[in-house]
Amino acid sequence: MANVTVIGAQWGDEGKGKIVDWLAERADVVVRFQGGHNAGHTLVVGNNTYKLSLLPSGIVRGTLSVIGNGVVLDPWHFKEEVAKLAGQGVTITPDNLHIAETCPLILPFHRDLDGLREDASGSGKIGTTRRGIGPAYEDKVGRRAIRLCDLAHLGELEPQIDRLCAHHDALRAGFGEPPIDRARLMDDLAGIAPFILPYAKPVWVTLNEARRRGDRILFEGAQGVLLDIDHGTYPFVTSSNTIAGTAAGGSGLGPSAAGFVLGIVKAYTTRVGAGPFPTELEDETGERLGTRGHEFGTVTGRKRRCGWFDSVLVRQSAAVSGITGIALTKLDVLDGFDEVRICTGYRIGDRTYDYLPPHAADQARVEPIYETMDGWHESTQGARSWAQLPAQAIKYIRRIEELIQCPVALVSTSPEREDTILVRDPFAD
Ligand code: IMP
């Protein structure tokens, strides 16, 4: 059995969309297992560009796609995304898309609460996508969520709505907001139920059957390890576990199903939203990375913060997530720099660190220790073999491998799916 789990190894936006698409062509099933429509995966297929937030990337090629129980699902957004893709000629049906019946729903007041909290946080803002992801996960672990399967039992929903509203009305009152309009909520749920229920399935059955058949399963992570609720730069993180281990719990397969763990790593570093970023460049070099790399968020359009490659963080991500090999993306953005830098450690006063200390205040004050290498002036864009890469770019990649203690499996040299150097086929392992 050769399954592959793809995760971001930095703060998200590492270029997972292209790599997942590249792998999806050879997968039998593609599975999302955490997060929600806060993700933004861009796929370029021929002349078409698809931007997905919630749907698994395999759907664009008609591969069986699964939204696992670990995902929080906004049913109205789902309808919109299905319609948007239909407009681009992608057919989505209950035959090629299965959604876990146990997915907790993101409801309109989750989105409101996300925004209200952000607006009230001043300089403590997390910089969320304001899509209600955090509040929906809170209700899941608070055991008061409305789940997809509940839409098939609307007549029995009232006690759950009572519990949920009691909790949220108190929170809303604290923000000076009126209580939830229950009649409207019930109408909205009744309105969306017929559209979404046909997709609701016991996906753990779908996936265990696929596994027994020997199908190749591709798990598609969203965000990145540094945004993981346990292992990320807390509290500036998302509300789910983004590490590879979540593939099992978030879909209904055992831990051995993850297979080859492919960490997607950008050749430099970016971050959207607030929080520590030791190698951030708030100067011309940072601007240059952002402009060359088109670093604007897929979901919110926000400008991404940019900085040098941080090997300390990626080594930590690789360790906590059990990464087997990495896909290095956007190498071409570094073309033309006289020199490039890699962060190899941190310093606070006299003390040095070879990992990111856990406290937010320490994370904010660490100073990066850099190693400087000569850059390259030749273009790496579109390279499809090592022979097409300048010697200095190869040196840069080799140094990254050494520092993060993890081998490169793929190098991506443009958004085009074929512009990829394959070192080790994740599906062949
Ligand atoms: P939330 O997931 O909307 O709660 O946002 C929490 C943090 O995760 C914020 O810093 C967001 O910018 C970040 N985030 C969420 N989804 C993504 C993503 O897909 N790419 C990059 N950052 C993300």
Image (cartoon, rainbow, N blue to C red):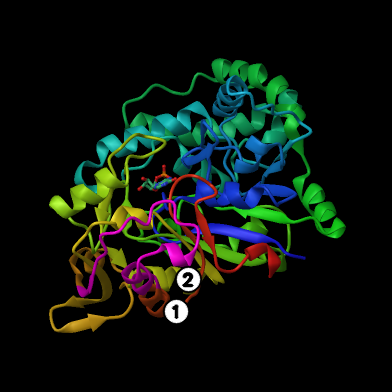
The numbered dot on residue 136 is none
Closer to the camera in the image, 376 or 294: 376
272 horizontally vs 170: left or right: left
Please provide percent x and percent y for residue 149: 72, 35
Residue 277, placed above or below residue 86: below
Tag 1 secondary structure: loop
Q: What amino acid is found at the position of numbered circle 1 in the picture?
A: Gln
Q: Residue at x 80, y 47 (%)?
A: 206
- Tell me, for residue 405, which label it has, or none: 1
Q: How many labels does the image show?
A: 2
Is residue 392 one of those drawn in magenta? yes
Q: Is residue 235 among the parts visible in the rendering?
A: no
- Location of the C terminus by quadrant is bottom right
x, y percentage for residue 70? 61, 49
Q: Which of 202 and 55 is in front in this view?
A: 55
Q: 10 Å neighbourhood of mark 2: few (<14), some, or many (≥20)?
A: many
Decide: marks 2, 1 in contact (CB < 8 A)? yes
Q: Which residue is drawn at 26% across and 53% down?
A: 306
Lower position in the chain sequence, tag 2 or tag 1: 2
Residue 318: give its label.
Answer: 2
* Percent x, y of residue 259: 67, 66
- Disc 2 marks a residue whose amino acid type is Ala
Task: Classify residue 308 as left or right of residue 264.
Answer: left
Foreground residue, 364 or 178? 364
Residue interval drawn in magenta: 369-397
Residue 395 forms part of the magenta stretch: yes
Give x and y (percent) for residue 359: 29, 68
User: Alpha-carbon distance for marks 2 and 1?
Assistant: 8 Å
Quarter of image, res 403: bottom left
- Position of 144 relative to 361 (above/below): above
